[in-house]
């Protein structure tokens, strides 16, 4: 195959998505920490599957349009850091094939090169030995191969990329000491290899088919103490217009369909955009039709305009509440944690955390539904921070001032909520809430899923692990002893309060024994127990 058309590109994308979906659990297991919270494979799989969902009914003769549509799906579906990085790879890929009807060898290579550049740009401090390294080295191989083998086929290009990606993956432990110590390769890099292998199979006419059992899980969120689905009620203004494009003359901006579509999707929903020669027809639901008209007018002159107030059309529905000045949006899983955050003024609790990170779209839809004037997002997990930041960009463009307090644990999220003052403005609250996260020492108890050695601690499968601020402190067959060792390591001279948050699988006698131990060994501190009901972690501990 010497050229790739839009339909073939669609098949390639789907094959790559199916290949990682068929083996995502293996990628989840490639976790540096030998604990049951690996979610890289899940995040990458669900991110790229959202891209597939977006293009499933798309028929276009243009590779440019196919790649752009796929990229938008990945962006909104992106989960976790690996999912966000993956979405940026395909955003750059789409930019690299802009205006291309078909792709030849050099186009494919340059598209991956563009994707790599976009992914590196999206990460504040890129680390080598990760999925970034694997996609970079595979892309460099693609560019070199295309340059030196101009008569080669697309299949041969993908073969070269897959070979180099596998070599790069095997080398990741030599670039990251923690991978070598844990005896694993980088999980995100393994995901990249799976996707590229799926691409290669499709290029050979052997597209990977999806196994019958693929993960499908919708994220729910709690809003005003009710469980809501993810469908956003659409109000505002139904805005439609037909515009005649201006001739391309000096001083005029040439029409850019993709630019207009991206703008419409930032400020509204239910977007339909049709371009027929010199006429463009647009339909969008938005709260700011004036902004839509002002942006579109740079390309031409309006033939017809129609604006209808959908709020008026839905008067039979419950009256919309007045917009809240500041809202808190947090992430947690477990009935106890949801109730706890709600009691601490959280307006929305998005279900998620380890093993199930919410997507960018989950944040956008939940917050758009609440429609506050401003909101503060607490990710409560280092793997959710990037998604929250991407969501904030979209929400800011929609007129909801959105800020992030980059909490990396449930305990930090709780402390941040306690630092919130409804009488302060959002900037003051951000400062106070961030400061509150720095006053808490975090610990958790979970179990080991394989033998390993980390930070000098010998770990056996089935042991209870005590983890303090992302560092394994102790490993013990007895959960009580593991908890005692962990809490001792967390204590400092000015500690005042210890909070114990039991998970859904911990026995009451374990909690009672730990509470007694703390009161006897560390009598200067107060002890509080807050039921969390969280999975994965038997105990969450906070020392302040």
Image: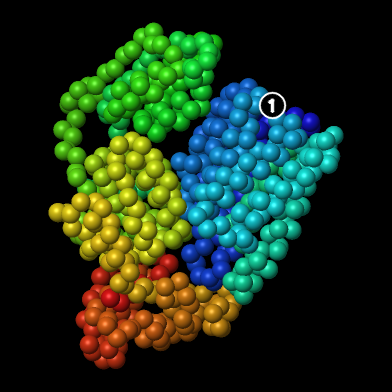
* Rendered view: 459 above or below 374: below
**Residue ID at (41%, 61%):** 381
The image's colouring method is: rainbow
Residue ID for mark 1: 102
299 relative to 99 in the view: left or right: left
Q: How many marks?
A: 1
Q: Position of residue 62 (x, y in %)?
A: 62, 24
Picture quadrant where residue 296 is located: top left
* Rendered view: 426 above or below 419: above
Other residues around mark 1 within 10 Å, as few (<14) / some (14–19) / many (≥20): some
Q: Position of residue 485 (x, y in %)?
A: 40, 86
* Rendered view: 535 above or below 510: above
**Residue ID at (59%, 71%):** 178
**Residue ID at (39%, 40%):** 394
- Residue nearer the viewer, 123 or 215: 123
Q: Position of residue 506 (x, y in %)?
A: 36, 74
The residue lying furthest to the top in this view is 303
Q: Quadrant of the C terminus?
A: bottom left
The residue lying furthest to the front in this view is 250
* Rendered view: 370 above or below 26: above
Q: Quadrant of the N terminus?
A: top right
- Residue nearer the viewer, 392 or 541: 392
What is the secondary structure assignment of the residue under circle 1? loop
20 relative to 201 in the view: left or right: left
């Amino acid at each position: 195959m010497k050229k790739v058309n839009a339909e073939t590109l669609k098949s390639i994308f789907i094959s790559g998505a199916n290949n990682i979906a068929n083996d995502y659990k293996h990628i989840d297991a490639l976790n540096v920490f030998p604990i049951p919270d690996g979610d890289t494979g899940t995040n990458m799989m669900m991110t790229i599957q959202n891209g597939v969902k977006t293009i499933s009914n798309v028929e276009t003769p243009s590779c440019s349009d196919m790649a752009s549509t796929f990229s938008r799906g990945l962006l909104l579906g992106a989960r976790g850091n690996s999912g966000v990085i993956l979405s940026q790879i395909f955003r750059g890929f789409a930019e690299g094939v802009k205006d291309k009807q078909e792709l030849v060898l050099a186009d494919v290579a340059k598209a991956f090169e563009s994707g790599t550049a976009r992914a590196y740009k999206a990460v504040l401090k890129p680390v080598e030995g990760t999925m970034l390294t694997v996609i970079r080295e595979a892309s460099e191989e693609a560019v070199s191969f295309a340059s030196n083998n101009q008569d080669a086929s697309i299949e041969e290009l993908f073969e070269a990329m897959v070979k180099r990606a596998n070599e790069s993956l095997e080398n990741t432990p030599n670039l990251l000491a923690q991978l070598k110590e844990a005896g694993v390769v980088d999980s995100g890099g393994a995901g990249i290899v799976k996707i590229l292998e799926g691409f290669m199979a499709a290029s050979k006419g052997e597209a990977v088919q999806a196994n019958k059992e693929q993960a499908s899980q919708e994220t729910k969120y709690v809003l005003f103490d009710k469980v809501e689905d993810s469908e956003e009620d659409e109000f505002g203004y139904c805005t439609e217009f037909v515009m005649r494009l201006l001739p391309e003359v000096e001083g005029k901006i040439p029409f850019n369909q993709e630019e207009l579509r991206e703008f419409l999707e930032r400020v509204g929903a239910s977007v339909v955009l049709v371009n027929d020669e010199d006429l463009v027809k647009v339909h969008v639901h938005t709260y700011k039709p004036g902004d839509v008209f002002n942006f579109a007018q740079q390309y031409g002159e309006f033939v017809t305009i129609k604006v209808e107030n959908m709020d008026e059309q839905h008067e039979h529905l419950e009256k919309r509440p007045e917009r809240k000045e500041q809202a808190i949006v947090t992430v947690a899983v477990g009935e106890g944690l949801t109730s706890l955050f709600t009691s601490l003024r959280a307006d929305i609790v998005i279900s998620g955390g380890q093993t199930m990170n919410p997507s960018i779209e989950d944040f956008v839809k939940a917050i758009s539904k609440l429609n506050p004037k401003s909101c503060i997002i607490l990710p409560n997990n280092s793997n959710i921070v990037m998604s929250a930041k991407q969501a904030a960009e979209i929400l800011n463009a929609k007129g909801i001032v959105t800020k992030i307090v980059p909490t990396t644990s449930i305990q930090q999220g709780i402390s941040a909520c306690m630092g919130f003052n409804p009488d302060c403005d959002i900037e003051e609250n951000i400062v106070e809430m961030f400061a509150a996260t720095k006053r808490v020492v975090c610990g958790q108890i979970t179990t080991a899923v394989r033998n390993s050695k980390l930070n000098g601690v010998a770990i056996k499968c089935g042991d209870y692990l005590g983890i303090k601020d992302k560092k394994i402190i102790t490993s013990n067959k007895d959960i009580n002893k593991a908890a005692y060792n962990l809490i001792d390591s967390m204590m400092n001279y000015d500690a005042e309060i210890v909070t114990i948050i039991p998970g859904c699988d911990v026995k009451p006698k374990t909690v009672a024994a730990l509470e007694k131990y703390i009161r006897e060994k560390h009598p200067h501190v107060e002890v509080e127990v807050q039921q969390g009901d969280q999975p994965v972690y038997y105990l969450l501990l906070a020392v302040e």
